[in-house]
Amino acid sequence: MNPRALSLRPVAAAAATVAASLCLMPALAQAQQAAAASGAAAGDGLKLDSVVITGTSTARTKMKQSVSLSTLDGDSLQNTVAASATDVLRTVPGLRAESSGGEGNANLGVRGLPMSDGGGRYVQLQEDGLPVLLIGDMSFATADQFVRADFMTDGVDVIRGGSSSTLATNAPGAIVNFRSKTGKAAGGALGFSTGLDHRQMRLDFAYGGKLGDGLTFQMGGFYRHGEGPRNTDVTLENGGQFRANLTKDLGQGSYLRVNFKSLHDKTPTYLPVPVVANGSRIETIAGVDPRQAFFVNSKFASDVVVDKNGNRVATNPADGLQVKVDSIGLEGQFNLGGGLQITERFRKSAISGRFIGVFPAGSQPADYAGTAKVFSAHIFNTSLDDMGNVFNDLRISKELALAAGSKLTLVGGLFNGQQNVGQTWYWNRYNIGLGGDGAGVYNNAGAASTGAVGDATTTWGGCCFRNIDVRVTATAPYAALTFEQGPLSIDASVRHDRQQGSGTQKFGSATTGTWNPARLNAIGWRSDATSYSVGANYELQRNLALFARASHGASWKSPDRVVWDLDVDSGKAPYPLNEIDQVEAGVKYRGQGFSAFVTAFFAKTREGAGYELTTQTVKNNSYESKGIEAEFSTQIGPVRLIGGATLTDAQITSGSNMGKTPRRQARLVYQLSPSYVIGPVELGASIVGTTKSHAQDDNVVVLPGYATVNTYLNYELRENLTLQLGVNNLFNTLAYTEAEGQNNLGTNPLYIARAINGRSAKLAVRYSF
């Protein structure tokens, strides 16, 4: 395919896609007839008949919704052999999940929307219909690090574009909703897994069922302990999760549910490692394998920092990504008759923890007198003092029967939320041996570090001895209407977000080692934006439907990326707003053992100014992206294949890099998940590939294209007892997800890159009952 073909105007491209898909339908039908003749199993692998409410105003099947949707069920999550909650999202077309940071710190993008900073600025992660965090791009507190997929997870819904702009705050690109089991299906499971080439053990469980007439319960969770897939001599994984809910069925579709979650977990933080940038190529350094290098070990016993109260505290770098989440929620749906329904969701979460990781930066210190090769590293030691939140979403809907069998559904809702952003940063600099396994820590005299305070130099460029304590409140009334007549449905929705922030920011003094009373900034700002979305869906026949949509949405940057500007702090200058305009059109088809979902999209993004820490630059650009995303599933006998691809043409449309491709945006990303069942054996794989992309917006250094393969082999020892062998990155592919230079931080600069973990294998046994 000629990539320049994507330069068509968006509506024309969408129409061309739909037309091409329609032309393919007779051929697809013939193929399905042939498959049926050969004994192919009937089925809809994309579950287009499943009812979805995530990011939509009315509960309808995927076939009838005018949005682009993907769903992953709980069983498929177990077979992905994914290493984290966001790792499973790599198999979703249109969604770009750079899940190379471990259990958190992933970057999430969608449809070419820019990853101008870390996290997921345009993607909202939810649990059971409410945000995990209000803001998706908070430094050191991305939403994915507070989510764990386990046996309690019933499935994941992903809506890209569409009405995500109007039915959630800070989510114009996508909504990803992790749904929990509710005990409706009685039974449970118990599983144990262990690493075969690394120290890691994990116990999972889930159980649910009826307690009485109309009363069901569900509980589940996990516990783990070990080092993780990268070699070290300290324990890095230690903790687990417990979740539970209790549901009372009130009849006629009404219910009341209370839910609880406790997540206390420690996992390793994987950050970029030193490499060499040779022109446009990234080259590894002898002894440092980006797939395996990890610089935290028993030689790095302590990192002394200052807490928010000015006290000196000794922290353990092995704590890595430490998270604590305790939440309680209430959910209810009440059908009052006459087509009137009220839905209420509430959750309060206490969230805290710490983020510690080794980040190479700057150059070798000039006064270093040792003989070992070292690099200069800063410890991203950030205390997550208070990241707690409280959210409430109240929705009222009314169905009206009209003439000729048509129907009008009116929806009104109000979202309220408060997100705390309380963090303390204190980043020491260390000299670390240039070796990826068992690296030593040295003082400036060239001797092995004893852990003394004088072995570290505080702090990195004076930027990172700070405390931020901000409360962001959001109020968002929204409304939607849906008109349905026969095969046609038309819907429109609007949302008005009002946000405000208040709190303080203070800076420390490296000289005194405590907070500087002269540098205390008061924060107080207000901002608002209106979003809208209009779409239509038409079923040409039961197994074929078309849809189209236009949307405008907004999102707000995290306060920690903005409050460097004192005028924004005080409210004198407007709070930077990010706006996205999108149009999309697509086709959905299902036949004998085959289903497909193809969408053409076009998006314009205008970003407000924001500060990126790792490059110490202000990002303020506009972008365009257009392309096609496709998802399909087919089954012929014992062979099943699920796949997808996203073809994207994106460019920067303002600033010094105008006309260039946004960083880390590949032209083609594809997914393939084949599986084969014969008797008690199931063999499967998950293949995720990408063409090359550029490390930065200047388009100089190239991130090579790659394909990673995860495989699994399930063997049913007896009924309900399964043994699984899983291998991540089977071919040990070196797959870079990000890279950057540190030219502004030293005269002998390092170049750094982060890669997906190398090959690792585990063995698991699962018993279902």
Image: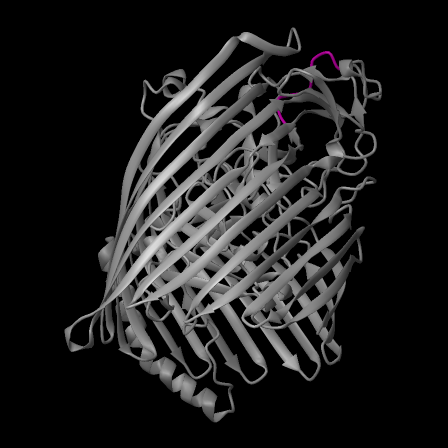
Q: Quadrant of the N terminus?
A: bottom left
Tell me, yes or no, if residue 348 can be seen here: yes
Regarding residue 657, the answer to whether it shows in the image is no
Residue 365: in magenta span: yes
* Image x and y of residue 583, in percent: 27, 53
**Quarter-of-image position of residue 283:** top right
Q: Is residue 50 above or below residue 389?
A: below
Q: Quadrant of the C terminus?
A: bottom right
**Residue occupying the point 46% across, 90% down:** 36
- In this image, 345 relative to 467: left or right? left
- Magenta stretch, main secondary structure class: loop
Q: Residue at x 58, y 45 (%)?
A: 327
Q: Quadrant of residue 445?
A: top right
- Residue 180 placement (x, y as % from top left): 56, 60
Q: Which residues are magenta?
A: 360-368
Q: Nearer the viewer, residue 162 or 6?
A: 162
Seen in the picture, residue 253 relative to 518 is either above or below; the reply is below
Q: Nearer the viewer, residue 478 or 120?
A: 478
Residue 710 position within the rendered picture, expressed as x and y whole percent measured from the top left: 64, 61
